[in-house]
């Protein structure tokens, strides 16, 4: 499944490359004629009118024209900057969900499970799961005024990620709907209902920008996104498309959202909060929850990686299981922004440290290459500005974030708190990828012992150190934590400072063992599970 996930991410680009070869063969020297492409766009718009994935088709067209013309900024004549269809051009052939009704909750859940034979649930798992879910829901519904007959709407397609599968639905009442997500797990016990999610925050984490994309059969993306947003009304439409695997169209929606935000605001881009990066210059605007990251021309000492190294590592993260701990980064080329929206100090800094990437053309700032990420609060800023209890929780989750990444065979490289951040829901994530590497490529070592005091006092190590050598004992010296928080970190995560922890995990990964970090808290799980015969 991991191999399938990586392959799927490449299919779109491979398809565009193949199509471009055909277009060049057909058009020859006329391929760069903009007037002709304007006509092609008009005909194409009519041809996609009858498709159920017309919005994806528009983005696909943009991917082709941007390769042909290397468009700086956007060009409405040859791109679908805004969709040609403000409402769906085709009626829904069938709904993306089924409707279920029953006199009791256990029967309702059982009926939902029986309608999804592809999950291959054993009868004992169906019985156990329906009663466990009913018992959990029974304690919730009276508080919401739902009594008598029960009605649910559940999406016909199951969502898959790792060894988990999900059925997404809602319990429908007279005046409101309660989100309902049934979470299944596959392990040595078989396939069983592992957890139930009903809180918006929990379900939002399921579709988080820090999670890998779902595998799900999508016949009509617009309707599936609309259903998801009916239970997550605050979820960004771009992130919803991206979570379904439509990352290219997610970029389109992200750009359209940015245009709308710029039109209704007057604030300016400025350098993002936190310490200045050695490799990237990062900027944002107060009213927009996205940061833009531009690679510097030259990196600050002691960084020794190249620009291509940085690009390769961002691509590695894009292809990797993000485990809810890595921010999804969308790559943009030849992005054009309004010069008037930049503070003078930011524009001066961009032109000074990233002149190979950033230029000014009249009233436009042209950025040849950058990454866009959801904005988070840097961890070092968070612990400095928040009260002790919140800072302690963040430090504990920081250690857990390192462990979650390690379980997916990733080592952050640079563990400084400034490279981690907190999401709006207080979850610690990692966002600085210029030193990230596979855990199995690291060489975890203990400090060699010496019998000479002068060796310990030397400015340089007296022993040999290779680029991939890691000394866990040294971590705590470079975390940059106040003493009180350092004690909290050691109390909860002392194992991260021992070589044995890392070597044992390496051995398990090298033996082919796979880990998947569940996207929901342990208290949402059912304590007992049936053993499938």
Image (spheres, rainbow, N blue to C red):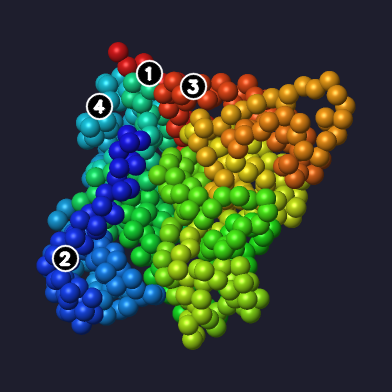
Q: Are marks 1 and 2 in contact (CB under 8 Å)?
A: no
Disc number lying in front (1 or 2): 2
In this rendering, the answer to whether 295 lies above or below 116 is: below
Question: On the picture, is 487 further left or further right than 124?
Answer: right
The one of 456 and 102 positioned closer to us in this rendering = 456
* Residue at the image position 40 percent from the left and 44 percent from the top: 319
Residue 33: % across, % down: 21, 79
The extreme right residue here reads 453
Q: Nearer the viewer, mark 4 or mark 1?
A: 1
How far apart are the two marked residues, 3 and 2, measured between alpha carbons? 48 Å
Q: CA distance from mark 4 to mark 2?
A: 45 Å
**Residue labelled with disc 4:** 120
Please say if the residues under marks 4 and 1 sit with CB atoms less than 8 Å apart.
no
- Compare residues 366 and 513 and report the one nearer the observer: 366
**Element type at mark 3:** helix
Cα gap from disc 4 to disc 3, whole angstroms: 29 Å
Residue pointed to by mark 3: 508
Q: Position of residue 518 (x, y in %)?
A: 46, 34
């Amino acid at each position: 499944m991991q191999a399938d996930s990586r392959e799927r991410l490449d299919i779109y680009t491979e398809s565009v490359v193949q199509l471009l070869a055909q277009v060049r063969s057909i058009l020859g020297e006329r391929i760069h004629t903009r007037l002709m492409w304007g006509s092609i766009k008009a005909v194409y718009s009519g041809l996609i009118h009858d498709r159920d994935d017309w919005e994806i088709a528009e983005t696909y067209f943009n991917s082709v024209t941007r390769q042909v013309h290397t468009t700086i900024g956007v060009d409405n004549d040859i791109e679908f900057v805004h969709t040609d269809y403000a409402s769906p051009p085709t009626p829904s052939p069938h709904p993306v969900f089924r409707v279920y009704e029953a006199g009791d909750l256990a029967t309702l859940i059982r009926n939902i499970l029986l309608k999804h034979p592809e999950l291959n649930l054993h009868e004992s798992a169906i019985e156990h799961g329906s009663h466990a879910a009913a018992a959990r829901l029974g304690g919730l519904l009276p508080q919401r005024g739902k009594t008598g007959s029960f009605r649910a709407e559940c999406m016909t397609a199951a969502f898959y990620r790792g060894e988990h599968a999900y059925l997404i639905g809602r319990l429908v009442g007279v005046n409101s709907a309660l989100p309902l997500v049934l979470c299944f797990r596959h392990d040595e016990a078989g396939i069983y209902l592992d957890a139930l999610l009903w809180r918006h925050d929990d379900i939002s984490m399921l579709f988080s920008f820090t999670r890998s994309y779902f595998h799900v059969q999508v016949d009509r993306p617009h309707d599936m996104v609309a259903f998801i947003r009916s239970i997550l009304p605050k979820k960004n439409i771009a992130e919803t498309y991206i979570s379904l695997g439509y990352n290219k169209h997610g970029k389109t929606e992200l750009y359209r959202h940015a245009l709308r935000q710029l039109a209704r605001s007057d604030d300016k881009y400025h350098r993002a909060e936190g310490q200045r990066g050695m490799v990237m210059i990062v900027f944002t605007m107060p009213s927009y929850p996205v940061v833009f990251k531009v690679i510097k021309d030259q990196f600050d000492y002691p960084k020794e990686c190249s620009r291509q190294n940085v690009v390769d590592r961002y691509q590695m993260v894009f292809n990797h299981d993000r485990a809810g701990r890595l921010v999804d980064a969308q790559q943009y080329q030849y992005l054009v922004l309004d010069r008037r929206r930049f503070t003078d100090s930011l524009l001066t800094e961009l032109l000074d440290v990233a002149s190979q990437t950033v230029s000014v053309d009249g009233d436009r700032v042209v950025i040849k290459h950058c990454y866009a990420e959801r904005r988070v609060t840097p961890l070092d800023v968070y612990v400095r500005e928040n009260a002790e209890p919140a800072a302690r929780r963040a430090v504990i989750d920081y250690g857990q974030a390192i462990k979650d990444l390690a379980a997916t065979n990733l080592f952050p490289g640079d563990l400084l708190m400034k490279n981690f951040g907190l999401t709006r829901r207080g979850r610690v994530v990692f966002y600085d990828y210029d030193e990230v590497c596979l855990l199995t490529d690291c060489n975890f070592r203990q400090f060699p012992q010496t019998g000479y005091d002068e060796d310990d006092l030397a400015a340089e190590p007296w022993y040999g150190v290779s680029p991939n050598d890691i000394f866990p004992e040294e971590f705590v010296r470079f975390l940059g934590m106040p003493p009180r928080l350092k004690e909290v970190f050691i109390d909860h995560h002392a194992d991260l400072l021992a070589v044995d922890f890392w070597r044992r995990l390496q051995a398990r990964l090298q033996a082919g063992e796979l880990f998947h970090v569940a996207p929901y808290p342990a208290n949402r799980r059912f304590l007992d599970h049936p053993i499938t015969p």
